[in-house]
Image (cartoon, rainbow, N blue to C red):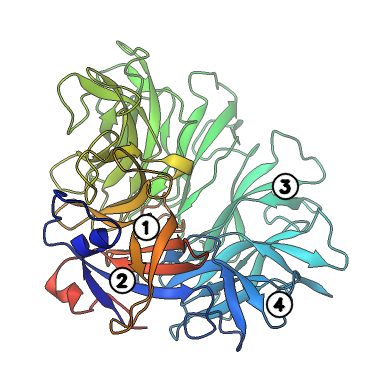
Amino acid sequence: MNRTVMLPLIVAAGGFLPGMPPVASAQLIFETRALAGTDGPLGPGLGTGVHFSDLDSAPVINSAGQTAFRGELIGVGVNGLNASGIWSEGGGSGLALVARKGNPAPGTTGAVSFGSFNTPVLNSGGQTSFRGFLNGAGVTTADDRGIWSEGGGSGLALIAREGGQAPGTAAGVKFNSFNEPMLNGAGQTAFHGVISGPGMTRVNNLGIWSDGGGLGLALVARAGSQAPGMAAGVNFVNISIPALNGAGQTAFVSGLTGTGVTSANDSSIWSEGVESGLAPVAREGSQAPGMIADVNFGDFTSSIPALNDRGQTAFIGGLTGVEVTGANDTGIWSEGGGSGLALVARKGSHAPGTTAGVSFISFESPLLNSVGQTAFIGGLTGAGVTHANNEGIWSEAGGSGLALVAREGSQAPGAAPGVIFNSLEAFNSKPVLNGLGQTAFLGFLTGAGVTGANNSGIWATDLDGLLQLIVREGNLFDVSNDPLSPDLRTISDLSLVTNSGGEDGRPTSFNDAGQVAFRAGFTDGSQGIFVANTLASPATLAGDYNNDG
């Protein structure tokens, strides 16, 4: 059952202070999806007496409001050999086990079982994909990792394993390691891998593989191979982690080497969404859109490109050329406007929402949503800028250009007057962006009354672009789904999956229904997985975007 809570009451439970400004008409609907210490519907579903002991990763959520997460177990029959797993609501009938430590790992032979797991990705069809580790007879450090996916539609299946032949390479060339996989709505995966074997060197041992073409796992691009559309002998080098969209297209950054390549043109952005195949979106040394003549792209090594289902990209690029200095040599570009690559923001330009004389000095890799809007973290310099207020989050989601979402040193909505944002990316947390243009993030606070017990929270913008507090450390929080039987606990810590625009194949915590999935730990040692609905509209409050539990 859903529970609707007026936002000021959530704050009041955690220590509302006289004079605290009210939060305008905001209502939140919370649901508990999993809870440590119970073997009922919110438990692991492994029988009486088996509980979650630790929900040790933040959950991911899909467009249907279903969640998936990694958890630890305690109870009857649980030991160190089987005490962890991945759970998902993607099957449509509540929380269910996807994979468990100690269980046979699909696609392997003999007594080979799962040993541990990374955080899963969950797609719109309720399918998961994850990187897992193996134990068992014959397993060595050369073959103890793999990537599994439910994307094929017939249950969990092995996509790739260390020590296995790497598609698109010579016989005997094998996977040596992987990054975590991307997963799209069609159940297709993509990943960055390192290979080893005959003829492998640092020049040619990186690549990207994907089954986005619909013909099984295939090589998309490999270091040391010919770069499409470039002069003969111009090859990829130092390929980055990819993004993957719903059409099975990838985007990535790569260096270039070979004939005619110099330090002035050896970096590039690539996408399969540009034409009918892999092609460059931008190359170092070429004219940068939005700049005067002879201002060219510099390198792209600080960026991982964003990608949406339209095949549009967004990325950070350096600049060189006429009138380019250290004060204005970086920018963010996007194809999201629908008329080609365009400048979104440039180092040295005025930062929207700040006073005159305050400009951008740095950028984090941007996010890109389904309608082509970007969001990013930017650093600031200029009049009145100090270490206490030199970073912010910006978004194009308002429809009228780039706007400030939150800034270090500014009043934190839902907190007492004078309690301000201290950090917007502690522990490498980045924003998350949904298709409605809403932005959510994990923020950290400072100010009167702020201690280590209440200095973090989760905020999100509503449909009007107004920032509201979702939940904060130190607050009392009702973990019961029964509004007639509350169970109030004090929040001790929060975690949130971030750094996705929703159509890039990455895990996300924020869907287009305005639902935010998060993990909360409590002072009694328990933890839970929760979903908050941030849309304050009559249709939403009637439950249109919530799954009753």
Q: Are marks 3 and 2 in contact (CB under 8 Å)?
A: no
Residue bearing the label numbered 1: 502
Nearer the observer, disc 4 or disc 1?
4
Mark 1 vs 3, N-terminal side: 3
For the point 25% across and 58% down, the residue is 11
Q: Give the residue drawn at x 82%, y 44%.
A: 198
Residue for point 60% across, 89% down: 48
Q: Amino acid at mark 3?
A: Ile
Amino acid type at image mark 1? Gly
Which comes sooner in the sequence, label 4 or label 3? Answer: 4
Q: Which residue is mark 3?
A: 195
Which residue is nearer to you in this view: 142 or 71?
71
- Which label sits in the foreground, 2 or 1? 2
Count of number-bearing discs = 4
**At numbered mark 3, what does the secondary structure look like: helix, strand or loop?**
strand
Q: Residues within 10 Å of mark 2 (few under 14, many from 20)?
A: many
Earlier-in-chain disc, 3 versus 2: 2
Q: Which of marks 1 and 4 precedes in the sequence?
A: 4
| Of the image marks 2 and 1, the number of the one nearer the N terminus | 2
Mark 2 → mark 1, Cα distance in angstroms: 21 Å
Whole-number angstrom distance, CA of label 3 to CA of label 2: 45 Å
Cα–Cα gap, marks 1 and 3: 29 Å
Residue tagged by mark 4? 78
- What residue is pinned by disc 2? 30
Separation of residues labelled 2 and 4 (CA atoms):
31 Å
Left or right? Give the position of 48 relative to 450.
right
